[in-house]
Image (tube, grey):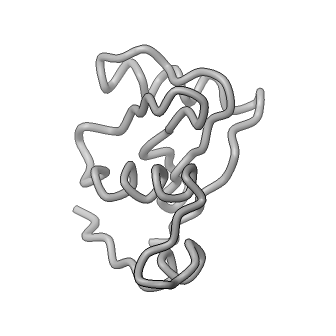
Amino acid sequence: MKLIIRRATAADASAVRRLAALDSAFPPTGDVLLAEMGDELWAALSVDTGAAVADPFRPSGELVDLLRLRADGASADGRTNRGLRAHLRLRAA
């Protein structure tokens, strides 16, 4: 399955609201990053507040961590986020 991390647009608002409802949380606001596996939204993170929502029925915890890294502009072990994404292996259920 292919991982895509991207900034949310207005067209993503309903999908983010559905994801937040699954997570029993409020949707993230402001500048939002999305993590999609295949064609499905698994996690979303507000860059402004750090609030995150994720699909509780999928192994999405690592995706939230990855979104936080991306939001912080951080790197791990000297690798850029792009390199980290390329090396990250997610265990999809």
Residue furthest to the right:
10
Residue 52 located left or right of residue 3: left
Query: Residue 57 falls in which quadrant of the image?
Result: top left
Q: Give the residue at x 60% y 30%.
A: 48
Q: Give the residue at x 55% y 52%.
A: 72
Q: Please identify the quadrant where the C terminus is shown.
A: bottom left
Q: Is residue 32 above or below residue 39?
A: above
Q: Is residue 40 above or below residue 1?
A: above
**Number of numbered discs overlaid on the protein picture:** 0
Q: How far across and down, in percent of the image, does residue 30 sit?
A: 66, 24
Q: Please identify the quadrant where the N terminus is shown.
A: bottom left
Q: Give the residue at x 28% y 65%.
A: 92
Q: Give the residue at x 57% y 30%.
A: 15
Q: How far across and down, in percent of the image, does residue 60 sit?
A: 31, 51
Query: Residue 76 falls in which quadrant of the image?
Result: bottom left
Q: Is residue 38 above or below residue 46?
A: below
Nearer to us in this view, 76 or 53: 76
